[in-house]
Amino acid sequence: MAKKIQLAGKTIFLTGACGGLGSAIALRLAQHKANLVVSDKNPRALDKLCDELVKRNLPEPMIYPMNLVGATPNDYKQLAKQLDKHFGQLDGLIHVAAEFGSLTPFLLYEASRWLKEMQVNVNSPIFLTQALLPLILKSKGTILFTSDNQQTISKAYWGQYGVGKAAIEQFSKILAQECDNQGVKVETITPPPMHTQLRAKAWPAENPDKLTKPLDVADLYLQALS
């Protein structure tokens, strides 16, 4: 039996909030009355997300536009100061933002693309976590990373996306051990195949009706937070 989700008043920071999975998680968190801070590289998409939640008579989240490609550790420290000022602590950090272009042979992989994807998929979630960890320690909160099916993305042509997800899974295991005696939970969630724009880049001919809807996956994150 699934445990009851209790997130009312909990402060949650969500990256990639305007993507297919991110927007679904944002909706479910708002429905459970969490103090939600949503982040994405597209300010207009963030505004649209907030408008949609307000139309549903749900709490309006705080928005924090941030392009992870150009963000630095100092930017994450500034974010931590803002969250500390407004909330004093952080109950949950959810990493959903991801960068993926296309399936590409490594011989043809441009260095600039690899570095961009490495920044979004690996460096940014790691240093964002480092900056926000003191606030999460205050609340004995939860950090959630998002991975992908390793049996699939460890095969040919998955490039940095495959490497990046493996790296994040390893980092999550290391951090989980470091936080084990401090009351902070660190987990990696691997969603089932979902109907999202990111997946469509890799499987353009796939029938979306046979895929899991992001809203059905969102509760995996809420259960882990609760």
Image (cartoon, grey):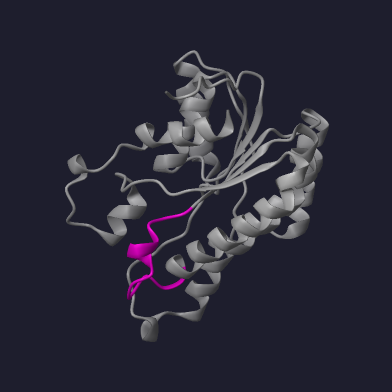
**Magenta highlight range:** 147-160
The answer, for residue 128, to whether it is visible in the render is no
Q: Nearer the viewer, residue 113 or 169?
A: 169
Tell whether 97 sits left or right of 199. right
Tell whether 77 sits left or right of 198. right
Q: Residue 217: within the magenta?
A: no
**In this rendering, is residue 216 above or below 128?**
above
Q: Quadrant of the C terminus?
A: top right
User: In the image, what residue occupies the spot 17% across and 56% down?
Assistant: 205
Tell whether 142 sits left or right of 46. right
Q: Residue 149: within the magenta?
A: yes
Asked which quadrant contains residue 149, the reply is: bottom left
**In this rendering, is residue 109 above or below 27?**
below
Residue 124 drawn at (x, y percent): 63, 58
Residue 51 drawn at (x, y percent): 49, 25
Asked which quadrant contains residue 162, the reply is: bottom left
Q: Quadrant of the N terminus?
A: top left
